[in-house]
Structures are given as C-alpha cells and as structure tokens.
C-alpha cells in the first residue's frame, strides 16, 4: 500500500523538480519516486571501472576467495 511522505524542499529545488516533472509529463510525486528508484537501483551495483580496480587488488581477491570458501562450507549468517 502506498505511503504518504511529507518532504520539505527549498523553493529553488521544488521549482527544478516541478519543471523536470512537467518536461517528462509526470506528476511531481511520480517524478521523485521514479528518479529515487533509479538512483537506488544504480547504487546497488558497481560499475565496470570500479569492478576492474577491485579485480586487480590481491587483498580483495583473497577476501573474496575466503568468503566463497565460507559459503561453500555453509559458514555464514543471514542478517535481516
């Protein structure tokens, strides 16, 4: 069920959001929700440049190998 959230914005920010929402033929609420969800989705993933820097890091690779070994041995805890 949708929730109502009160949000306090500076006038300038509100005008920018309103203008952007109108340009995309969206309500302000839909605009904010859509762009927030896009941001959250993108924040969950590592881009290719960042990932390649991890892949070249021996300490990172050792840590990942250790983690994978623990998973295979069922030595982990799921935290909710």
Image (spheres, rainbow, N blue to C red):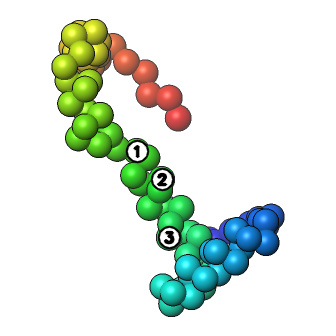
Spot occupied by residue 60 in the image (x, y as percentages of width and height): 28, 15
Q: Where on the picture, by quarter, is residue 26?
A: bottom right
Spot occupied by residue 44 in the image (x, y as percentages of width and height): 40, 45
Q: Which residue is mark 2?
A: 40
Please tell me which residue is depicted at 56% across the width and 82% down the height of the picture: 21
Can the viewer see residue 71 in this picture? yes
Residue nearer the viewer, 48 or 77: 48
Can the viewer see residue 69 in this picture? no
Regarding mark 1 in the picture, which secondary structure is present there? Answer: loop
CB atoms of marks 1 and 2 within 8 Å: yes
Regarding mark 2 in the picture, which secondary structure is present there? Answer: helix
Q: Which residue is mark 1?
A: 44
Indicate whether 9 appears above or below 47. Answer: below
Which comes before the other along the chain, label 2 or label 3?
Answer: 3
Indicate whether 45 appears above or below 24. Answer: above
Query: Is residue 19 toward the left or the right of residue 35 in the image?
Result: right
Regarding mark 3 in the picture, which secondary structure is present there? Answer: helix
Residue nearer the viewer, 74 or 69: 69
| C-alpha separation, residue under disc 2 versus residue under disc 3 | 10 Å
Query: Is residue 22 toward the left or the right of residue 3 in the image?
Result: left
Residue nearer the viewer, 36 or 19: 19
Q: Which residue is mark 3?
A: 34
Indicate whether 57 appears above or below 80. Answer: above
Report how many numbered discs are placed on residues in the image.
3
């Amino acid at each position: 069920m949708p929730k109502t959230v009160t949000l306090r914005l500076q006038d300038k920010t509100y005008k920018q959001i309103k203008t952007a929402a109108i340009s995309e033929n969206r309500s302000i609420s839909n605009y904010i929700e859509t762009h927030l969800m896009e941001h959250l989705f993108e924040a969950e993933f590592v881009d290719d440049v960042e990932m390649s820097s991890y892949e070249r890091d021996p300490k990172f690779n050792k840590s990942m190998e250790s983690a994978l070994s623990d998973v295979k041995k069922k030595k982990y805890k799921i935290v909710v």
